[in-house]
Amino acid sequence: MIRKAVIPVAGLGTRMLPVTKVVPKELLNIVDRPTIEYVVDEIIASGITTLIFIISQGKGGIIDYFDTNLNLRSFLKERGKFDLLKKVEEVEDKIEHLIEVRQKVPEGLGHAVLMAERAVENEPFAVVLGDDLVDGDSPCLKQMIDIYNHLSTKNHSIIAVEEVSREDISRYGIVEGEKIENNLIKIKRVVEKPSPEEAPSNLAIIGRYIFDPVIFKFLKKIPKVHGEYQLTDAIQLMIENGYEVYAYLFKGIRFDTGNKEGFFKTFLHYATKNPKLKEILIRFVKENKIC
Ligand code: UTP
């Protein structure tokens, strides 16, 4: 049973500078709520109740967002703003068990996940990146948990992947493996940011994982490369040591909100799911002869 999710949000967000000097990218608003709330909603809808946030200096606002603000609650109550009060309470009551862990130096995603070792307590767990959103009929993490539970192997791990275009290959960890079921591949090798010529496939690792806790042992063994410990290096070691790691082609659309173009597309996607906002956008485009 997967009971815990680790959410690394300690990165510097340099691709979103200058705003990320002062506002974590995970708190940037997408239509009606911050990016991180979409991620938290997916985790909760997948049946997970313990959320372990890996934060760093300047990222405390993410925790505050889900924390109880008594002053605000009484202010809204006194002014009779009960609709807003309800909204605020909904956010603050969302997470049943929130754990906050500090990554003092941003030494990469592998290092961030390692920071969660004590809080995870030696059980299988999920890792969900705070700037990667997936929209679909069923939560991406829930799909992965179902696959995880259905596999008969032991101590296995699952990584969500999607097909990417040739020009995007070098931005991702890419997997090589053998198809064992529809949408499921047994991974033989993972390569971090290969050139399109060297890449063994176009299946890119996205920000959703389910790990056996043995990953921590391998995270302690990997070398630092260009100042960072890469999660993919630990996954590769896990495979080399006989642990089964599967790539799952999830159903849904995935958005990388951590760069400006991706953030813009994410905003448009969620805005146009609302018929009223979609109509406003279409009228605006027509009136201003944008296309
Ligand atoms: P990214 O590389 O996408 O995020 O890391 P970043 O480092 O914040 O952004 P850029 O590249 O400077 O623009 C993927 C995820 O891993 C987390 C990030 O917060 C993000 O959710 N991360 C990354 C950490 O928690 N710690 C790190 O040291 C590095």
Image: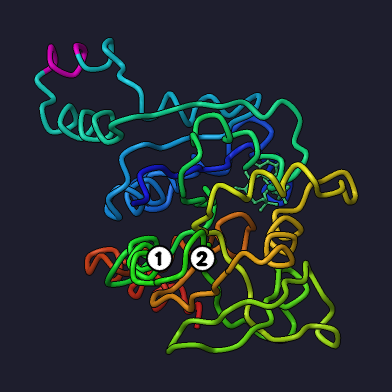
Residue 208 belongs to magenta span: no
Residue 36, percent from left and from top: 44, 44
Please name whichever residue, 52 or 15, is drawn nearer the observer in this view of the structure. 52
Mark 1 C-beta to ligand 1 under 8 Å: no
Which comes sooner in the sequence, label 2 or label 1? 1
Please name whichever residue, 240 or 173, is drawn nearer the observer in this view of the structure. 240
SS for callout 1: helix
Q: Amino acid at mark 2?
A: Ile
Query: Can residue 13 be seen by looking at this rendering?
Result: yes
Residue 291, percent from left and from top: 50, 83
Residue 75 belongs to magenta span: yes
* Residue depicted at 78% across the width and 74% down the height: 170
* Residue depicted at 63% across the width and 80% down the height: 203
For the record, the magenta segment spans: 74-79
- Residue that badge 1 annotates: 148
Q: Is residue 78 above or below residue 184?
A: above
> Residue 115 lies in what quarter of the image?
top right
Left or right: where 108 falls relative to 266: right
Query: Can residue 18 be seen by looking at this rendering?
Result: no
Left or right: where 71 falls relative to 108: left
Residue 202, percent from left and from top: 67, 84
Please name whichever residue, 246 or 132, is drawn nearer the observer in this view of the structure. 246
Find residue 158 and name its label: 2
Q: Is residue 151 above or below residue 115?
A: below
Crowd rating for badge 2 (residues with CA inside 10 Å; few <14, some 14–19, many 20+): many
Q: Amino acid at mark 1?
A: Tyr
* Residue depicted at 58% across the width and 37% down the height: 24
**Which of the colour schemes (rainbow, by chain, secondary structure, one colour) is used?**
rainbow
C-alpha span from label 2 to label 1: 7 Å
SS for callout 2: strand
